[in-house]
Amino acid sequence: MTIEELYRDLHAHPELSFEETRTAGIAAAELRAAGFDVIEGIGITGVAGVLRNGAGPTVLLRADMDALPVTEDTGLTYASTATGVMHACGHDVHVACLIGAVRELAATQAEWAGTVIAVFQPAEEAGGGAQAMLDAGLYEKVPVPDVVLGQHVGPAPAGMVGAHPGVAFASADSIDITVRGRGGHGSRPETTIDPIVIAAAVVGRLQTIVSREISPQDTSVVTVGRISAGTKNNIIPDDAELGLSMRAYSEDVRLRMIAAIKRIVNAESAASGAPEPLFEFAESFPVTVNDQLATERTMTAFRSEFGDEAVIDPGPVSGSEDVGLLATAVGAPLVYWILGGADPEKYLAAANAGTIERDIPSNHSSHFAPVIQPTLDRGVAALVTACREWLRS
Ligand code: ZN
Ligand code: ZN
């Protein structure tokens, strides 16, 4: 199967986080065919392949495999065949490109020396995939890398690549809060502690974290994306639930925000004489930091291979990633770059009209549809170029 055929097949068969068994099977078969030693089932569905080719540096290439609970609306001939599941974040591009790189690196072993590790990671979207592979002993099963490399496709023009040195992706935390009160009849509020009033005060007061507690120099977001309480107009419920998401670009700011959220919710509960609220920390992504020197070295390799005009600095991205854990777990530098996937002509037309936000579907959209070429060829070449930059030639 060509990489394009492989991509269409992956796109048509998306799988949710930690359920990527078909995708993992394809990855493992490809790795074996290319002569890699293969370890399967690392962190439920994770796969790692190791190709030892003499003395030299060890390079880890990572692709995430999972899809999203989105109903595809692209109209593509190779659209999802799984109801309500779609590769809306382009992880199928990542898998196809890494398989392409695996094939090419295996076929050109006379030209390089060292060890290549290809990691197919589960559950990036749910936030637990990289950690699950580490917890399952990834670095007892494969050698510790000298550098961790990877890419994410996005709504930049296809053919473009580029990484931002330093903080590249925001941290993201999802916090579920239960404000507890004491329920009763709506006509007798004096017998109750109304959790809806507490929740309302919390929502208002949370807005002061970004506006009053965090420096204007530090970008951050707190969003209450979910609030629910009550069953009937004349019943004061026992509790109220708030679903928060927050993002930050430094660990220091992230910790200050979490502390502020707890303080505000606790204090608003205490102000009403309510029982202590409950906090549940769900999805959590750390800040993704690209190593300065390693990123500059890799971008220099990209510029000489693809030309200056094809290499961009996307700046810090407000999305989040767990790829950094694979690097920080062993103190290795990370280089994680953006791979353009948007139709270059459509992108240019939208840029000229000032309608990029409206006309170029972003990741997680039901219309997200990277053009197959030059996206795949550039994605394979970027992985191979970056990898070869670190291997001994
Ligand atoms: Zn995503
Ligand atoms: Zn993604």
Image (tube, rainbow, N blue to C red):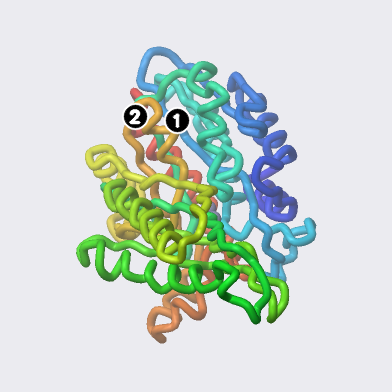
Residue 2 seen in the figure: yes
Q: Choose top left, top right, bottom left or bottom right for residue 150.
A: top left
Q: Is residue 252 left or right of residue 102?
A: left
The quarter in which the C terminus is drawn is top left
Q: Please state which amino acid type lies under the numbered disc 2.
A: Ala
Residue 373 rendering spot, x and y as whole percentages: 55, 58
The quarter in which the N terminus is drawn is top right
As helix, strand or loop, the secondary structure at mark 1 comes to: strand
Q: Which mark is residue 332?
A: 2
As helix, strand or loop, the secondary structure at mark 2 comes to: loop
**Which residue does the image show at 49% across and 17% down from the upper left?**
52
Residue 159 seen in the figure: no
Residue 217 rendering spot, x and y as whole percentages: 20, 63
Which comes sooner in the sequence, label 1 or label 2? 1
Q: Is residue 57 above or below residue 384?
A: above
**Which residue does the image show at 68% across and 46% down from the upper left?**
6
Q: Which residue is mark 1?
A: 60
Residue 168 rendering spot, x and y as whole percentages: 33, 51
Q: Residues within 10 Å of mark 1 (few under 14, many from 20)?
A: many
Q: Please state which amino acid type lies under the numbered disc 1.
A: Leu
Q: Residues within 10 Å of mark 2 (few under 14, many from 20)?
A: some
**Which residue does the image show at 46% across and 43% down from the upper left?**
322
Residues tagged 1 and 2 counted as in contact (Cβ below 8 A): yes
